[in-house]
Image (tube, rainbow, N blue to C red):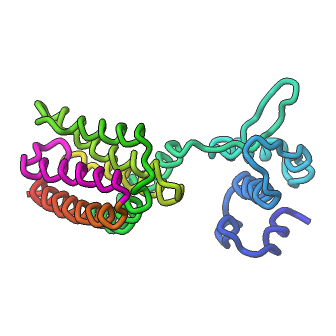
Amino acid sequence: MSIEDDLGRRAVSPHHTLSSRRRKRPDVIADKVRDQIVTADLRVGDRIPADWVTPETLNASRGTVREALKILEIEGLIVSKTGPGGGLFVSSIDPEDAIRFLDNLFLAEPPSISDIYALRKQLEPVLAAEVAGTLSNEQFVHLQSLIYLYQDEPVSAEDEYRQRLAELDFHSGLANLSKNRLMGFVCRFLHSLLQDKSECRAIYSEPTPWGQREMGVNYQVKLLRALKMGDALLASAIMREHMIEAEKFMIERAVLLRK
């Protein structure tokens, strides 16, 4: 039975849509190997059985199999090791690499500021509530140090931009502390989208009114206090208000820049 017949008989999965039959053969084979790894519940560092990736098993030429395995290597799912004890092993992709990969998906048609904040307003208050009362002294000091980076008045457009990114770094630092890895990852991805969005880059490079700057810093300081006290409800409320004000500011500045 050919691989196409086998795929056709299997239940449709995210990797096996109708359009997958029109994809290039190496992509389809890469999906098959990926499914085997998932089905067998292989973990990072586990060896991939050699008979899974032979041309005979996959009903493909050696060149096509090499291309398929290269796809999985680029995606970060497998790694090839040479020498004694070498072979193919399950690997893991760095979260930052995954975020950059996803960023590229939105380069052509980036989401709007409102789209991004629609998610931030929902997720980040939950994140703040979850982290409340769990910070070690070291983690608290680290988040506090990020606030210090943007407390002073910037002296140039470059300094302004660096400080605005530091504000996002504060939120990403908070996201890194979430025990819910998925929520933390999504929050960091949203921060990355803001950093990459050309409209936001222009806003971040413009001087921020002092009152707005003070408001932002005050939100962070109040949030840190609530987190340290372990007051989940207060931390959530502060974060939600912060997100609402941040969205309002970003949209207003975007409108001004378009004029």
Which quarter of the figure has residue 156? top left
Residue 237 image point, x, y percent: 28, 66
Q: Quadrant of the C terminus?
A: bottom left
Q: Is residue 26 above or below residue 252?
A: above
Residue at 46% over, 49% down: 177
- Whether the magenta-drawn stretch holds residue 103 is answered as no
- Whether the magenta-drawn stretch holds residue 222 is answered as yes
Tell whether 171 sits left or right of 59. left
Tell whether 231 sits left or right of 213. right
Tell whether 141 sits left or right of 65. left
Residue at 74% over, 55% down: 34
Residue at 87% over, 63% down: 2
Q: Which residues lie in the magenta part?
A: 203-230
Residue 154 image point, x, y percent: 13, 34
Q: Is residue 179 above or below residue 114?
A: above
Residue 57 image point, x, y percent: 91, 53
Residue 6 image point, x, y percent: 84, 68
